[in-house]
Image (cartoon, grey):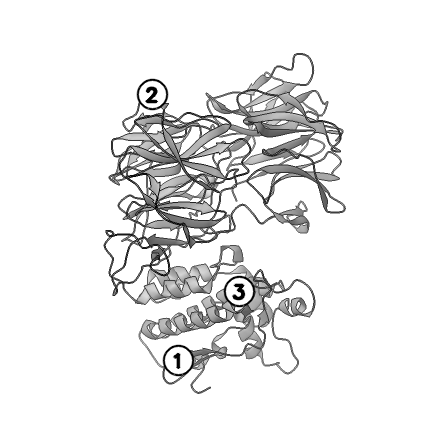
Amino acid sequence: MEGPTLADRISDVGRVPRSGPAGLPLDEALPIARQIADALEAAHEQGIIHRDLKPANIKVRPDGTVKVLDFGLAKAMDNVGRVPQSGPAAEASMSPTITTPAMTQAGMILGTAAYMSPEQAKGRTVDKRSDIWAFGCVLYEMLTGRRAFHAEDVSETLATVLMKEPDWAALPATTPPTVSVVLRRCLQKDRKQRVRDIGDVSLALEGAFETAAPASPTGAPVVSRTGRRVAWAAALGIVSLAALGWGAFAYFRPAPPAAEAIRFFMSPPDAWNFQSLTDATGVSPVPMAVSPDGRRMAFVAVGAGNSALLWIRSLDTLTAQSLAGTDGASSPFWSPDSRSLGFFAGGKLKKIDVAGGPPITLCDAPSSRGGSWSRDGIIVFNPANAVALQKVPAAGGTPTAATVLVADETAHRRPFFLPDGRHFLYSAASGAQTAGLSIYVASLDSADRKLLLTADANNALYSQGHLLFLRETTLMAQPFDAQRLELAGEPFPIAEQIQLSQTVPPNGFFSASEHGVLAYQTGTGAAGSQLVWFDRSGKELGVLGEPAAYSDIELSPDGKQASVSVPEQSGRARDVWLYDVARGLKTRLTFDAADELALIWSPDGSRAVFNSRRNGQLDLYQKAADGSGTEDVLLEDNRQKTPVSWSADGRFILYRSGGGPTGNDLFVLPLSGDRKPIPFVNTQFGEVTGAFSPDGRWVAYVSNESGRNEVYVAPFPGPGGKRQVSTGGGTQPRWRRDGMEMFYFTPD
């Protein structure tokens, strides 16, 4: 192949004295980078990963054509995009560097090590994200003239890859923001947070050096590849502590022939991240909202100590501005004039002028399951779990009913107003949850409603003549006549792998403006978590079972079994399964078509108490832990109940009760006598979970009375004052077996 290698080009530039940066000029580096990305994309589409991408393996021909060479370490991926887990291919994929005897030159080995992904350096299996890491190293070197990770020998280089960040200050001052963000996303050490597809990088780089005239938001929508297509408007890329990437903005509009779609990444503010938090009731709200005019983005960012704050970013600027007074905010939604934001915080529905001023409380709202603001100054919202929608004037006041639960419906959630300001979309959840969520359109002017479709997430939106909704984790668009309130065509996919909240039913993390700007977060959804053993030093010891959408884990008293809730593949409902810890085998404990979620064990491990939604709300049931016998009702009322702890003497059960006037509270259920529940912590704040101490004299519990979840301890049965245990946020407390130590989760 004629022409120098990219390594030669970079070296030649470095030898020429220059007043500016030592790397290649931007107008030379970016076209090369795009061609490298295109080459990798072609390989990945054929199921091949390179595994040894570096400047020495890239040729630049005299005509400017770039060729990626030397696939000597390349391996074919299996059908899930990873190197096979066993056999010779797996052994080769575990190799952290080239170690054949002939290759003894330090530069050759060091060069290879400098471009290895962290997982490659650790000797773990690799996938296409390792190539994306190497691409980031190459792009960094082109721009700066130096390696992203450099040390004196191989071991120090690998340590640098694993432990240090590149010198971002070395990037030229003229580097476009998009390129800077692409680099940071490619060089995420946790591959779950890394860009997932090199094609996304290629498109983002196109936006870095090719300008596109913005298209008019008017005109009839176009809805497929052959006359129905979606022209993307931008790509949104953000770091999340849930290790999830972010997706794209889009215009649903016919683009003029000369116009191109706009795609770009958006980074979180410094020292903040886009972690998906749960509120005090365990809900994982939708953390973003595009303004109706499509010019601004509101999002919830999380800082030190698990503190959440609302931020606004105008899409024509490079920075975001925080909104003072929005601590603990969740589920933002815009006013129709794009000047104000509604949000939930501290058990209240609030609003704030984005131009400045303090937040204003509108009414009580213990939970944050969505709101929408009409052109006529009416806000429709869900105030708590297991209730219908309510409406309140945007100036504040006493809420009134907006919808009514019927039949076996358990809740109405995530309203979204149509352009006329009188009709709105919402989802209706039923007790069984095996056939998806029903998406209705209703009106402020009557009790009538109309079923439109079923979806696999709570939220459905309207944008530019389309309804947007989820089928599993695929974002679909279906033409919709907003005046006749009728679907006008077949649905088609516009994005995949939309992130889902860890709730049942889930929320999809996407938002759309009226004129077609769409923002969404991508990820693995609720599926793919893994049960992992750690020792007390934090060392990983092993795994239990296969990856699945696990929740509500609880070890039996003897440590020989673990209960988990897992959703059925055929629907949204969860069932409780029991793992044999020693053998790693699981057996199903519950079989009802409705949700069975949290389980607690009796002190001797012979019985289990769990909650089930089979009668509409979550009630408490008990059953023999070996699966024999019947499932008997333990407690049934009109509130949502979750068992959290069983006292060591077997006399009491501690459970969370939600859906009442004060939101989530902790109650104690005696298992003898009249079995009348007794309030334990019943305040205006949210009490999420708790645990009896082994001697039964104390209860550790979680409350958000300070503005965030913290762990407290109070005497049982009381009276007596409480003591705060955690200081920077905490949840899910667990006592050591002798009661002399406690474990809990902190925000990090």
- Residue 31 seen in the figure: yes
Task: Report how far apart the C-alphas of labels 2 and 3 lie in the structure.
Answer: 54 Å
Q: Secondary structure at mark 3?
A: helix
- What's the residue type where badge 1 is placed? Thr
Residue labelled with disc 3: 128
Disc 3 crowd rating (10 Å Cα; few below 14, some 14-19, many 20+) is many
- What's the residue type where badge 3 is placed? Lys
Dot 2 and dot 3 residues touching (CB under 8 Å): no
Residue 460 versus residue 62: which sits nearer the camera? Answer: 460
Question: Between disc 2 and disc 1, whose residue precedes?
Answer: 1
Report the residue at 47% width, 30% height from top: 411
Q: x, y percentage for residue 145?
A: 41, 73
Residue 672 versus residue 525: which sits nearer the camera? Answer: 525
Report the residue at 32% width, 50% height from top: 517
Task: Report how far apart the C-alphas of labels 2 and 1 lie in the structure.
Answer: 67 Å
Quadrant of res 290: top left
Residue labelled with disc 2: 398
Task: Report how far apart the C-alphas of labels 3 and 1 lie in the structure.
Answer: 23 Å
